[in-house]
Image: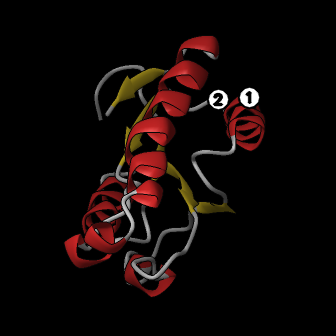
Amino acid sequence: MPKGISKILVTGAAGFIGSEFARQALRKGYEVVVIDKLTYAGDLERLKGTGKEYRFYKADICDKKQIEIILKKERPKVLVNFAAATHVDRSIKNAAPFIRTNILGAQILLDAARKNKIQPIL
């Protein structure tokens, strides 16, 4: 474990890539906090099999107030963002949810991380 880092907050950790990152972090002994909206791409079953526990918050990264409450409560050392709206076919039909999550959500996370003195890795 890198010096000084014990707790990692992972957004989108119920998704395909985020869940692998969270599983690896758990296996390496990090304390993991998960934020996921659990949309069509999220499945908490992906986080099973590590033998380790994690804390879970069902939340939208675009909900500034909720994100700030979680970060203030948990005080992670690092924030890693895998939360994203995916599926190109859906974005062609309606780009707004993708822009909201992938751009506005990332900005909300960055602002909240800076406010709470958390090192973001986005």
Instruction: Single out the mark in the foreground, 2 or 1.
Output: 1
User: Which mark, residue 72?
Assistant: 1
The one of 107 and 24 positioned closer to us in this rendering:
107
The one of 109 and 23 positioned closer to us in this rendering:
109
Decide: few, some or many residues near mark 1? Use Cα within 10 Å; few <14, some 14-19, many ≥20.
some
Which residue occupies 23% across, 78% down?
A: 89
Vertical relation: 113 (above or below) 46? above
Q: Identify the residue at the far front of this view.
A: 93
Which residue occupies 44% across, 71% down?
A: 14
Identify the residue position indicated by label 2 in the image: 75
Badge 2 marks a residue whose secondary structure is loop
Q: Is 4 on the left-hand or right-hand side of 9?
A: left
Badge 1 marks a residue whose secondary structure is helix
Marks 1 and 2: in contact by CB < 8 Å?
A: yes
Query: Mark 2 is on which residue type?
Result: Arg
Q: Is 61 on the left-hand or right-hand side of 120?
A: right
Which residue occupies 35% across, 52% down?
A: 82
Q: Residue 107: percent from the left, percent from the top?
A: 47, 28
From where the camera sits, is residue 8 visible? no
Q: Residue 3: percent from the left, percent from the top?
A: 34, 21
